[in-house]
Image (cartoon, rainbow, N blue to C red):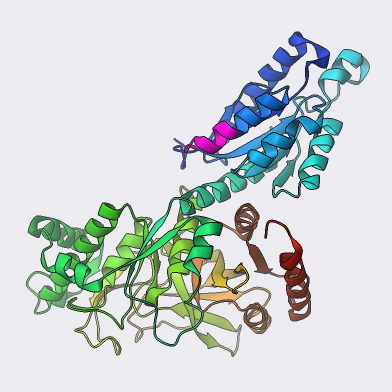
Amino acid sequence: MKALERFEVWLVTGSQHLYGDEVVAQVGDHAAKIAAGLDAAATVPVRVVAKPVVTSPDAIESVCQQANADPTCIGVAAWMHTFSPAKMWIAGLLALRKPLLHLHTQFNRDLPWSEIDMDFMNLNQSAHGDREFGFMVTRLQLSRTVVAGHWLDPDVAGQVGRWCRAAAGLAETRRLKVMRFGDNMRQVGVTEGDKIEAQIRLGAQVNTHGVDELARATHQADPQMVAETVADYLDRYKVVAELQPDGDRHAALLDAARIEVALRTMLDAQGARAFTDTFEDLADLPHLPGIAVQRLMADGYGFGAEGDWKTAILVRAVKVMAEGLPGGTSFMEDYTYHLGEPTPKVLGAHMLEVCPSITGNTPSCEIHPLSIGGKPDPVRLVFTATSGPGVVVGLTDLGSRLRLVANTVDLVEPDQPLESLPVAHAVWEPHPNLSTSAACWITAGGPHHTCLSTAIGADTLTDFAAMAEIELITIDQAATPTTIAQQLRWNHAYYQLAPHA
């Protein structure tokens, strides 16, 4: 079963009537085989469906409008088997509201050198049919991703699969509802933003719900659901003695379970898959949500602390992109640095809210004081993120546009055990190094709240940004402060002039 089987990508193949019905039928047969081959590829996480060959402007516009209207279709992959005059595509391309992949391939991998005749040449014209199509997409200044190579090449399937994951993330944001409990942290700038612009660009609806409503739901939580949640805590995690049923702080575990039941109930009632809270507005909640937030993220919900709805959207989108892949995705914050030997690195954490999907170990369920919020001590899961490659990405609102800033990283073990740090955390070495990445991140205006993923890479984010028509700055091994600053200057000019930006 495919990880994102609820979604489809439509393979739309272009041809024309010049070569006769027999050739068009052969084109359709080849397209069906290509779609089936990509559909069977393990790296392609969605269904790939071949649509009937299009040979006229009306047919092209019709299939594009059908794609727009079908909620299961997350994108269109276009391929020109024969020559398909590109003026036929104008109306359809202008009408298309789903992401576009240009698959530049051909049915046969090898040329039958000694057998080539004009019939073969007329049928297998992707080499210049796709160039005709590519010109028109460029002429219309439409965003798309181009994947070139033979459709049976695993690398081609991998590129198609990454594009499908990005399209799935965008499909999710376009229907996403975010519940905000309280506002953002007072006097903080980067967690502010234009929710209308975010809905225009990404589709996500961000609406506030009273914290008192959540508090009432917590106190009224169904006792059976609370008991089942506590039982799951005890079964799944290493619960410290004081939180055990016979422990002197077991009541705090019950409070944590009540908050989780209330959050799940309210989110599901609203059809919301992301949420925020803030320690400055807790009303009559027993304490700041800790383990509840962590477990909801582990189940795929997006989250942003301190009212950070942009990061909540981003975490949910990346979680959808990463479905079925090894690794995890979490809300994160660059908390403090190690600037000494042997290698400078970042210690990432937050007060409570780090998703256990980024660790391969069993978390410990603990309770400790929290120096802010003015409430009793909250229950949380404590663990260290598993080592391996990852990406840290943040979403900011610059007023004139949205910007994603991404940094490729290597997660590593702490230099020494963090025995006195009772929160979930991750340690990473950013690319190309800490001083360069930090300078580039700050120059780009990247936020302090981020999404950390060890499941997807920067290439998927590149496709996502292109689909959403939002800016992306990637800090990787090749980045320098000079090149990033230059890219920012060029991008500023582009986004002032681009018709779709």
Q: Residue at x 29, y 58 (%)?
A: 267
| Residue 185 in view here | yes
Q: Position of residue 26 (x, y in %)?
A: 72, 14
Q: Position of residue 129 (x, y in %)?
A: 82, 31
Q: Which residue occupies the foreground of this view, 14 or 433?
A: 14
| Residue 455 in view here | no
Q: Residue at x 55, y 31 (%)?
A: 66
Q: Which residue occupies the foreground of this view, 88 or 253?
A: 88
Rendered image quadrant of residue 119: top right
Q: Is residue 139 left or right of residue 381?
A: right
Look at the picture and state if 143 lies above or below 13.
below
Q: Residue 68: within the magenta?
A: yes
Looking at the figure, which quarter contains the N terminus? top left
Look at the picture and state if 296 lies above or below 142.
below
Q: Main secondary structure of the magenta part?
A: helix
Rendered image quadrant of residue 63: top right
Residues rendered magenta in the picture: 65-72
Q: Is residue 304 left or right of residue 452?
A: left
Q: Residue at x 59, y 74 (%)?
A: 399
